Image (cartoon, grey):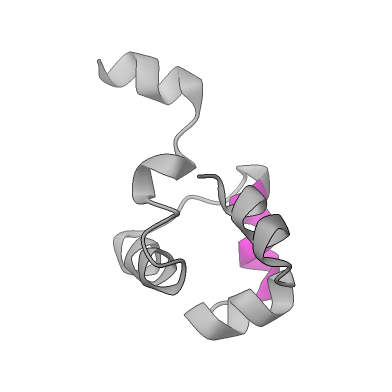
Amino acid sequence: MKLTDWLRREERRRSAFAASVGVSPATITGLCNGTVWVGRELAKRILDETNGEVTPNDFLFEEQLGAAQ
């Protein structure tokens, strides 16, 4: 599930989510827009905070997934 979709479904503000995973709201916006790359530690914190619903693979775009196959 994309982070943007999860935030919308859970009615969570980006700023509150950012605080819960220890980054700035701008970082969360960048992750949602695909302009910031997620690192391993942050991906793990997001995975934990979303109870496994947003995975590291959810930050990949279709072009990246196709190239990896």
Pick whichever, 5 or 24, lies toward us. 5
Q: What's drawn in magenta, residue-wise?
A: 24-32
User: Could you tell whether 34 is left or right of 54 in the image?
Assistant: right
Pick whichever, 20 or 1, lies toward us. 1
Point out residue 46 in the picture as x, y percentages from the top left corner: 44, 66
Q: Is residue 22 visible?
A: no
User: Could you tell whether 54 is left or right of 44 in the image?
Assistant: right
Quarter of the image holding residue 26? Answer: bottom right
> Mostly what secondary structure, the magenta segment?
helix
Q: Residue furthest left?
A: 69
Q: What residue lies at 41% left-to-right and 24% top-to-bottom? A: 64
Point out residue 50 in the picture as x, y percentages from the top left corner: 46, 66
Point out residue 16 in the picture as x, y percentages from the top left corner: 68, 81
As drawn, 18 above or below 10: below
Q: What residue lies at 38% left-to-right and 63% top-to-bottom? A: 47
Q: What residue lies at 25% left-to-right and 15% top-to-bottom? A: 69
Quarter of the image holding residue 10? Answer: bottom right
Point out residue 37 in the picture as x, y percentages from the top left corner: 48, 50
Q: What residue lies at 71% left-to-right and 70% top-to-bottom? A: 14
As drawn, 33 above or below 38: above
